[in-house]
Image (cartoon, rainbow, N blue to C red):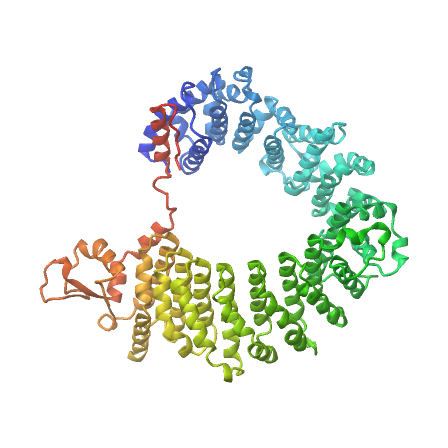
Amino acid sequence: MMDSDCLSLLPAVCLVLGDPKQSPPDDTSLEKLLDWFKELHSQSNEQVLLQHQPCLKEFISSVCTSKTTDPAILSFTLKLTGLLAGTKQGFHLLEEGGLLVVVFERKAWCVCDLWEDASVRSGWLQGLLNMLRHRQALDFFSGNGLIRVILQLQNDGSLFVSCLANQLLVHILNFLTSSNMTNGCDAVGSTESSLSPEWVLVSSEIMNGVVEALNSDYHPRVLQGLRLLSLVLSQCGEPIRSTLWKDVLVPLEVLINRGSESLTQPLMTVLQAAARTPLLGQSECKVEELLEAMLGTGNKKESFQCAAIIIKLEKCPEVLKRKAIDIVLFPLQCVSAQSQDTAEKMSLVLKEQLSQKASCISLLMQSLSSLEELAYTKYQFEGISIHSVTSSVLLLLRICSGHFPSSLLHINASTHLIGCCKVQRCGLDTLGALSVYEENVDTRTEIFGVFLDYLQSPDSHATVLKKTYQATVRWIAVSSSFPDLLQFISHDLFPVLEKRMCDLQWEVRDSTLEFITQLTVALNGNSGFIEALHTSGMVSILLSSLADTEGYVRASAVAAVGEAVTSSFHHTVLVSNSNLMEEALKQMMKILSQDTEGFPRRAVVKAFTSWLKGSHPETAVHPSLSSVLSLGGNDFDWEVKMHTLDLAEVLMEKTLNCCPYAVQNSGPTEKTHLTQALSKLKEFGLFDLLFNSLFDCDRPVCEKACALLLKLRTLISECEDIDSALVLNVNGNRWGNEVQNRYLNKGSVCGTNGVTASDERTDTALHCIKDISLPMLLHILDLDDMQRTLKLSSDHVVNSPRSLMEDILSAAQQSEDNTVDCY
């Protein structure tokens, strides 16, 4: 917030900004200054700025009456004026002497051609948007003919300006429906006769503008009318919505029956918005009829696009939805048909589109993505069997890989699809989504065969392989009862994965490792799979991947090895492979201490966190924790440090879990347990990690450490007997120096209050401090204040209103060659 010092700078800043001889600050500086005005205006008395800062009125007047004003300054002034006029008191102060008319009537400055600048037009609109907070503002709009100008700007050549005009018009309509504009009656359900004259006048002007736009022969104007209509339907309530829909129903029917391809998408956007409102259930509103008219008979190019949109409607009538499904799935069924029966039903439009490469691919992807959308909702198809739909997707994928000829050779569909990565990726996503249907049980062998073909094919693109892996995991996850699953994995899948792990493309190696990780997680309860994983040689391949040349691959290998180790703890299948944990720890610690890339090191710390969270024997993981905490806490990658603090948090929770959090009435046994647990954490080096992180150069690291220390302080604050039992060494470490300089040098006395000295003197020789108890250290540190400070942005001092204003003034005193960068 601007303090008195900032406000004292304001007159000088206004003089600089209002001086046409000065180069204006950059747009970012002006926007930031406006943001601070908004904050000050919202937190202060409404009259403070204008009453106690007359320089603002002088600035606004000088800018809007000058013939040499810079467009950026004028735009800023328009926004600021609207902001100041957003309160009744501010509005009246600016209205005195006709200043508001001077600013927004444009007669004073329009002669300078400033209106031709898009930033000025958008500033004008934003100013009005800022002002519209009370009835007087709307009266000003209406009384000065501003609604008409806003409607004109709806068709502005600048997309930003036209969108802002639409937003303002919607805001006006919403403002009209507020209770204070309806003569004391509730706007919802009100009739036009019960509404105030102002409501009727302003709303009619806007609604008539929409109707005129829809009836226009000028295509861009029709588009803008449809955009505004869709916004009103989405964002406005009653009676605006119903009243406007009644007015536009006829021109909408005309536009839909005209069948203009360029209007298909905006018309569907309007109907989508209408379908999400109660208008859909009202027969006189004809929403369902209009949607069905958009679909037509399915013989238009636009029918497929409309069908894809209708399928996604939440409250779509079932009859209409089934018709849309039939239309959207027909291209897929045609291309993958094994007989000519379906082909004979094709319309000329569909044949033409399928014979052209671009439209063929677009249609099939639309069909597949719609099917995927339906599968996610587990939609129950009527009249179409899931088995036949899945078979169509499988056949399409085979066509794309060149393994199955299309029956529609006369439309050349197969030549467009062979090797088409777009359709392959989309088809694999859809096939994965179809795994939710139990009716596909009998198709699993064929499905796994298609997956295997793609994984084995040397022509499969890296992104297609990744999609294949994702779809395979989904099908395997729901096929645990499939009798041939383990044989497929052991004899078919693992050999392919072994070859893919040697692929020259690192992306392929990376996605293969990700797949193995996901597979291990999905089948963690399947002892047969775990045994196959550990006896097939795959684990050795995973371990060797820890030394891959690519950092991303090493990181994925760490995750895969981590899951393999996890599975070994959950099942007793590693009698002959008992050194897996030892080898994994050895290589992971090497990565953490020596790897030059951050991703693998992050993955190592996350693997330890996962192990610690799970049910692994503590004896297996704990010996390495001290090294992990030390290395991770001193890593130069801040994300590694954050993951290390996550590990520390889990370690704290597990170690202190047996200790009661409210120990003030506990007996000596509970306090002993707490002391022992804290001593154990000290042995791990957890406290050194937390205190070092507290003074780290990366703010997120400090925040996390501070939060953990506050939890720790809360836990031990009620226990009085651990002061002498848990002592930390202050000397010889990074955090100790910080504590000495920041806190202990401010008057603490050696040898007292838990602080011990290296000799028996009790003076203030600060260099003598050696040890301090943990409770005393937590008491000395002002953790609450540190947490408040850390929550501020790192540039909260520099990026302040005072700094901003000083930069603007400083730039005005320098040569024009110098540029200002306030941020």
* Quadrant containing the N terminus in the rendered view: top left
Q: Is residue 132 visible?
A: yes
Of 212 and 682, the residue lying toward us:
682
User: Taking 510 as reference, is 789 left or right?
Assistant: left
Residue shown at 34% from the left, 34% from the top: 802
Residue 486 position, x and y percent, is: 65, 77
Residue 125, image x and y in percent? 56, 29
Q: Position of residue 500 (x, y in %)?
A: 60, 65
Residue placed most toward the observer, 362 or 133 = 362
Percent position of residue 596, x then y: 41, 58
Q: Is residue 449 above or below residue 765?
A: below
Q: Quadrant of residue 606?
A: bottom left
Q: Residue at x 73, y 51 (%)?
A: 366
Relative to 215, is 449 above or below? Answer: below
How many dots with numbers? Answer: 0
Q: Is residue 746 left or right of residue 557?
A: left
31 vs 664: above or below: above
Q: Is residue 316 visible?
A: no
For the point 60% across and 74% down, which residue is it? 523
Residue at image point 15% right, 64% down: 752
Image quarter of residue 604:
bottom left
Q: Give the residue furthest to the bottom.
A: 575
The reply, left or right, for residue 598 in relation to residue 188 is: left
Residue 705 sits in which quadrant? bottom left
**Quadrant of image for the C terminus:** top left
